[in-house]
Amino acid sequence: MNHQSMNGRAVLLAAFAAEALSACATHGDAPKEQMAVANSAVDQASGNAAEAPAELTTARDKLARANAAMARKDYVAARQLADEAAADAALAQATARSARSSRALAEVNESIRQLQVQLNRS
């Protein structure tokens, strides 16, 4: 299984989990659980800022918009934005993992190439 399909599955799972959480709450209730999940997901993804800056910026922006919606008691928008922020944070995590895996593979390939050069000299 390649890294893109694994990353895509992680993002889909995060989206489904977020949707399941939003389905459990009524539209009139403050989406406290979704906000907590989104905050946690963005916090965890923050360690990947260098490897997934665009995805992390999008997640942070949506979380800020969700907080603003909560402040004005627009719970439908807050719930949707929190769910999206959590999914974007999951995408940032997956993108960072993919970047690290790609770098590791490149290093292994370079090591193999160097070993082949040394063997050919012998």
Image (tube, helix red, strand yellow):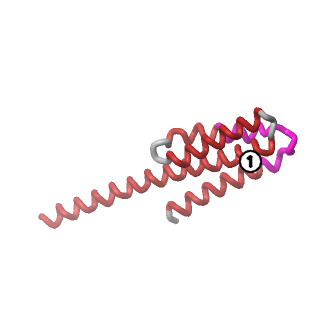
Q: Secondary structure at mark 1?
A: helix
Tell me the kind of residue under disc 1: Gln
Q: Is residue 69 magenta?
A: no
Furthest residue in direction left, as rendered: 122
Which quadrant does the C terminus fall into? bottom left
Q: Is residue 12 left or right of residue 111?
A: right
Q: Is residue 97 left or right of residue 23?
A: left
Dot 1: few (<14), some (14–19), or many (≥20) neighbours within 10 Å? some
Q: Position of residue 55 (x, y in %)?
A: 55, 48
- Residues 66 and 29: in front is 66
Q: Position of residue 75 (x, y in %)?
A: 80, 41
Q: Position of residue 90 (x, y in %)?
A: 60, 49
- Residues 55 and 65: in front is 65
Q: From the viewer's perspective, is residue 23 above or below residue 37? A: below
Residue that appears at 59% across and 46% down: 58
Which residue matches tag 1? 80
Q: Is residue 8 left or right of residue 82?
A: left
Q: Is residue 107 left or right of residue 39?
A: left
Furthest residue in direction top, as rendered: 71
Q: Main secondary structure of the magenta part?
A: helix
Q: From the viewer's perspective, is residue 110 above or below residue 74? A: below
Residue that appears at 64% across and 38% down: 40
Residue that appears at 77% across and 51% down: 20
Q: The magenta stretch spans which residues?
A: 21-39
